[in-house]
Amino acid sequence: MKYRLLKDKKIIVVCGWISREREVSLRSGKKIYEALLKKGYNTILVDPKEDGWEPVLNGDVIFIALHGKPGEDGAVQGFLETFNIPYTGSGVLASSLAMNKIASKKIFIASGIPTPMYVSLNSDESVESFISRTLETIGLPLVVKPVSEGSSIGVSIIKKEEELEPTIRETIEKFHDIFVEKYIEGREITVGVLEIDEEIVALPILELVPKKEFYDYNAKYTAGMTEFIIPARMNEEKYKLAQELAILAHKSLGCVGFSRVDLVTDKDDNPYVLEVNTIPGMTDLSDLPAMAKAYGIEYEDLAEIMLYSALKSKK
């Protein structure tokens, strides 16, 4: 009964467009589209790069399957709100905060959520000054990251001082806004957060064991490049803590409907929140569907739950 409200609506799944994650977004969109068709929804798949935005504006409800900027950062959400069109997932502010890793880190710290120590590059600061401040504050090893990218795009682990300056310069040239973060050696884990029947639930934790040094873009989206372990092999107490922190991170940013929270644990299984993804991947290899399945939710049902987040109020 509760999933009949949108059966007579035109559902537009928006994917692709112009971000660095375009190809993954197309794959997510196609899977979501097929799942909603199987569920009996009047669904249309739209890639604004090929089809323009007119088909989107003619829809009743928009399922946003755009990854990265623009699309996951609040821009499309604000555009749809201008036309009063309901859309899935988080609102403008939460989307923007989650995409900006410095903004989200500040909120995590203010909310008492453990996150790795970091140093951000000031707009008027020289590279030399930034490197000096970084080494003095957090030392090596460390991680260089763009402020506003997803799917681990542009992320580099630095263990030798001579690698630091060229990596920082290259990352600045490509992404402009960057920061560095203390490298915590341990498990890479991710926690799906799903709002089911008005309850916010943390899904079983997925442990990621990449064949490469860390879970980068290729490891995320290439079959066989990563071993996925559910549930994560963690101390029971720390496992529950990681789930609690994921829900707290989701709430602290004001996320709506669903998210995927990425964490790292140290050698004692203490979890640290890295970031919140407001539009998680929904491909065959994606983490959220795998965690949902371990919880007992099949892909088609997950897509339907996510669709109905469009009816939730946005902050």
Image (spheres, rainbow, N blue to C red):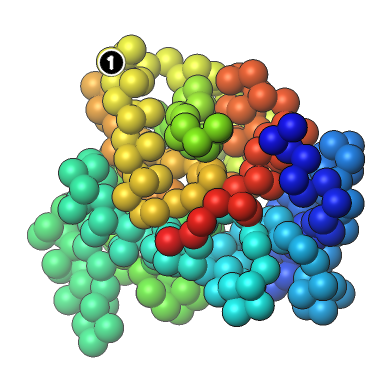
* Residue 169 quadrant: bottom left
Q: Is residue 82 above or below residue 281?
A: below
Q: Is residue 85 above or below residue 221?
A: below
Q: Is residue 213 above or below residue 310?
A: above
Identified by mark 1, the residue type is Glu
Residue 130 in percent (x, y) is at: 21, 72
User: Label 1 belongs to which residue?
Assistant: 237
Residue 124 in percent (x, y) is at: 23, 87
Single out the residue that lies furthest toward the bottom.
124
Q: Quadrant of the C terminus?
A: bottom left
Q: Secondary structure at mark 1?
A: helix
* Residue 155 quadrant: bottom left
Q: Is residue 168 left or right of residue 2?
A: left
Residue appearing at x 15%, y 68% in the figure: 132
Residue appearing at x 50%, y 36% in the figure: 198
Residue 96 in percent (x, y) is at: 44, 66
- Is 243 or 143 nearer to us in this picture? 243
Residue appearing at x 38%, y 28% in the figure: 243
Answer whether residue 149 is visible to the viewer in this image.
no
Answer whether residue 243 is visible to the viewer in this image.
yes
- Is 26 or 165 nearer to us in this picture? 26
Q: Check disc 1: other Cα within 10 Å, few if <14, some if 14-19, many if 20+.
A: few
Q: Is residue 130 above or below residue 191?
A: below
Residue appearing at x 66%, y 24% in the figure: 297
Single out the residue that lies furthest toward the left.
136
Residue 146 in percent (x, y) is at: 42, 65
- Is 69 or 45 nearer to us in this picture? 45
Number of numbered discs: 1
Q: Quadrant of the N terminus?
A: top right
